[in-house]
Amino acid sequence: MKDSFMVKAVVPKLESFLELGGIKKDIVCLVISGATVLCSLAGLSPFPFDVAWIAIILCGIPIILEAIIGLVTEFDIKADVLVSLALIASIAIGEIFAAGEVAVIMQLGGLLEELTVRKARSGMEKRVKLTPTTARILGANGEERIVPSEQVQVSDRIRVLPGETVPVDGVILSGQTSINQAVMTGESMPVDKTVGDEVSSGTVNQFGAFDMEAMKVGEDSSIQRMIRLVQSADAGKAKIVGLADRWATWIVVIALTAAALTWLLTGQIIRAVTILVVFCPCALVLATPTAIMATIGNATKHGFLVREGDALERLANVKKITFDKTGTLTYGTPQVVCVKSAVPEIATDTIYQFCAAAEQLSEHPLGKAIVKCYKDETRRELPSCEQFAMLPGRGVSAEVKEKKILAGNLEMMSEEAVTLNDDILAETTTFLKQRCTVIYVSADGNLLGFLVLSDTPRENSAAMIDQLKQLSVEPVLLTGDNGEAAASIARQLHIDDIHAECLPEDKLRWIGSYQDKQEAVCMIGDGVNDAPALKKADVGIAMGGIGSDIAVDAADIALVDDKVEELPHLIALSKRMMVTIKLNMTFSLTLNFIAIVLAITGILNPIVGVLVHNAGSVLVIINSALLLNWKQRTVTSDQHRHHSQKREYEKSKLGQQKQFQEGVSRESMGV
């Protein structure tokens, strides 16, 4: 009668909670249930029934329903089956507080687990936004009309203006420009394009209008192929099942067998119920999510945004870490790394100043990079330039200090009859093979020298790679750059396994080959071209600061501040997390088996049993909480080497240029 009154009184008041959705509703139910269990323990109740019934209704019934559905539809035995048995048995013998307490503990574990595995599903929308929506088609009489990009047909003539995204794959018919191809290749340096060169959809026209003929449209375009690669890679990544659920079948069998035998041998059902209560895997269920939550908190303080909790479990087993080069191990922007004089009596500072002054009105990314580097390094203002002219695909010309300055590529020097001797050509060829960009500088028709621009390694990349090796994780370089450029960066960073000239499909293939050898792979990248590989890998980590939205969405973890030197800490932390989880589980199972022995002998009753496994749950939470402030211990010699490398990177820019130049010179001499 009391129970019937309780249901009529409480259920209507709870219906409003059903309007709340997802996590918010779970939190509200958990708070209310926790309060009612505490009231029940203290003997406080404003109702003519045990208020722990509210906890059973809010937290216990959903657990029982889920267990029944899993058993009926898939015969899926999880931890919630044993929890349901403990709930029902406790209610059957009138231990309402015990049932309510079990329900609250299990709801807490489920909520923590749900919070760790939630993932935003906006990724496909972002990929769709990446696809160009319109195209500028030219008619037979030269008139322009803007149409949706999906209406473009093969052989249509399309005009692309500066700053616009190329709508489809095609070939340039007229005009010259520079294309940012990072979306497809990951290359940091813009590529000059002219008549006859191919351009890909999704890439960005930096400057200079051009006309092109459509070759691949719709689903055949490069950007659509990229989207399909991400989708296919995502479909192949399996989710990890909770450890408690993996062992649930055996736990259920052991618990039921022990309870049945105890009832048959002693004839006391309360002992059998006590066994079910103490065997309820509260601490076991809390073992994993509490450790993951604490680890996520630690990782957040080190700049990592963990989007999927089970990614940390996968990360602990990683054997290979594959790196994209540009923007990940390097800064991803062109820097002036060398200034060389072709005339002994002219200082390199003078050549640098002339080139930067001539480029100060340029809209080309390389020109802007030269001006920025000059101002950052010298802290001086540039002299004014006059009669500025930009020659697409060649360079710039301007009058600086009453001298006609040319700054451009080899074709420009040839067209302007500027003579380059064999020594200069040989030296610059070595730089070009390493995927550097060379800007020749002349004054009044005479060569002064040249500047070299290149993407440069992050200051802590080498130390980070060494620390990964100490953790028995092998670094791998997957880059779209050519072999010599990749090898040059790899030597500086101590990476032995290199794969160059990789398209997105190639990166997928290499990651798949490692996985076929049962080697778990972590992929780290920043560009759209890395998105398929980030999905394919067992764990994907995106550079969140400079990385594209697509890469960040494709990854399991985002490095918000782009400090790659924190990566060894994350991997060591994930390994420590797994140790903590195993300790938690070993402790909880040991405690449960001891409690079963005491329950069989009658020493424990259901109430005391609840308190025992409550104590186990608290200890598990405390052990997991230690992960919040855990730090990796490093050997003193390693620290010394790390700081030494950091000091080397913090030297003056001139020192970096000399090191780079000396390295190239050694290569050119065959050293």
Image (cartoon, grey):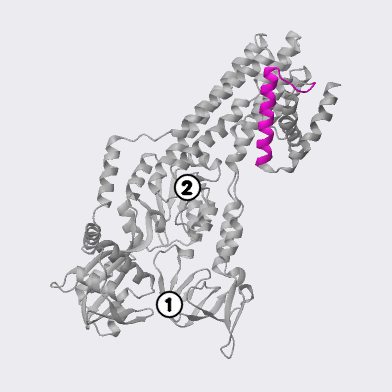
Q: Main secondary structure of the magenta part?
A: helix
Structural crowding at the residue carrying mark 2, measured as other residues with C-alpha within 10 Å and reported as few (<14), some (14–19) or many (≥20): many
Please state if 286 lies on the left or on the right of 543 as rendered: right
Of marks 2 and 1, the one in the foreground: 1
Identify the image quadrant of the C terminus: bottom left
The residue where tag 1 is placed is 177
Q: Position of residue 256 (x, y in %)?
A: 71, 21
Q: Earlier in the sequence, mark 2 or mark 1?
A: 1
Whether residue 381 appears in magenta in the rendering, the answer is no
**Number of the label disc, if any, that sits on residue 608:** none
Could one spot residue 473 in this view of the protein? Answer: no
Q: Residue furthest left?
A: 345
Determine the secondary structure under disc 1: strand
Disc 2 to disc 1, C-alpha distance: 37 Å
Q: Examine the image and state in which quarter residue 412 appears.
A: bottom left
Q: Indicate the quadrant where residue 36 lies.
A: top right
| Horizontal and vertical percent position of residue 457 | 34, 55
Q: Kindly tell me whether residue 308 is visible in this rendering.
A: yes
Q: Residue at x 34, y 44 (%)?
A: 466
Residue 305's spot in the image, x, y percent? Answer: 50, 46
Q: Which span is picked out in magenta?
A: 23-48
* In the image, residue 32 lies in the stretch drawn in magenta: yes
